[in-house]
Image: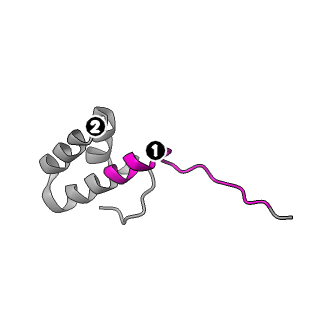
Amino acid sequence: MFTKQLIAPSRPDLATAEIVEAGIAYLATHGDSYAAAYLDENNVSFNVMVRVLTEPEHRRSSHYPDW
């Protein structure tokens, strides 16, 4: 019998992960102020907002290309 091993995602909170990825997309299309406001309105922590908006090399893996 085969068993499937699950690999832990880099972002355990999938709802927040989707919000963060949308914020990264907004950064590319609408700029940093818009992206920051979107993330803030969706209760993303300040530390995460700063990391994803200003330190692309420290972002967790994404389903999207590097914006």
Q: Residue furthest right?
A: 1
Callout 2: helix, strand or loop? Answer: loop
Please indicate whether residue 3 sits to the left or right of residue 25 in the image.
right
Would residue 47 be counted in the magenta stretch?
no
What type of secondary structure mainly makes up the magenta span? Answer: loop
**Between discs 1 and 2, the one toward the N terminus:** 1
The image quadrant where one finds the C terminus is: bottom left
- Which one is in front, 27 or 12? 12
Badge 2 amino acid: Asn
Callout 1 environment at 10 Å: few (<14), some (14 to 19), or many (20+)? few
Q: Mark 1 highlights which residue?
A: 13
Give yes or no for contact between labels 1 and 2 (Cβ–Cβ under 8 Å): no
Q: Mark 2 highlights which residue?
A: 43
The residue range painted magenta reads 3-20
Please indicate whether residue 50 sits to the left or right of residue 4 in the image.
left
Position of residue 26 relative to residue 36, above or below, is below
Q: Measured from the top left, where is residue 25 in percent x and y?
A: 26, 59
The image quadrant where one finds the N terminus is: bottom right
Measure how far apart labels 1 and 2 are at the Cα level: 13 Å
Please indicate whether residue 16 sits to the left or right of residue 40 in the image.
right
Q: Measured from the top left, where is residue 38 in percent x and y?
A: 20, 47
Residue drawn 36% across the image and 66% down it: 65
Residue drawn 30% across the image and 39% down it: 44
Q: Is residue 20 visible?
A: yes
Residue drawn 19% across the image and 44% down it: 36
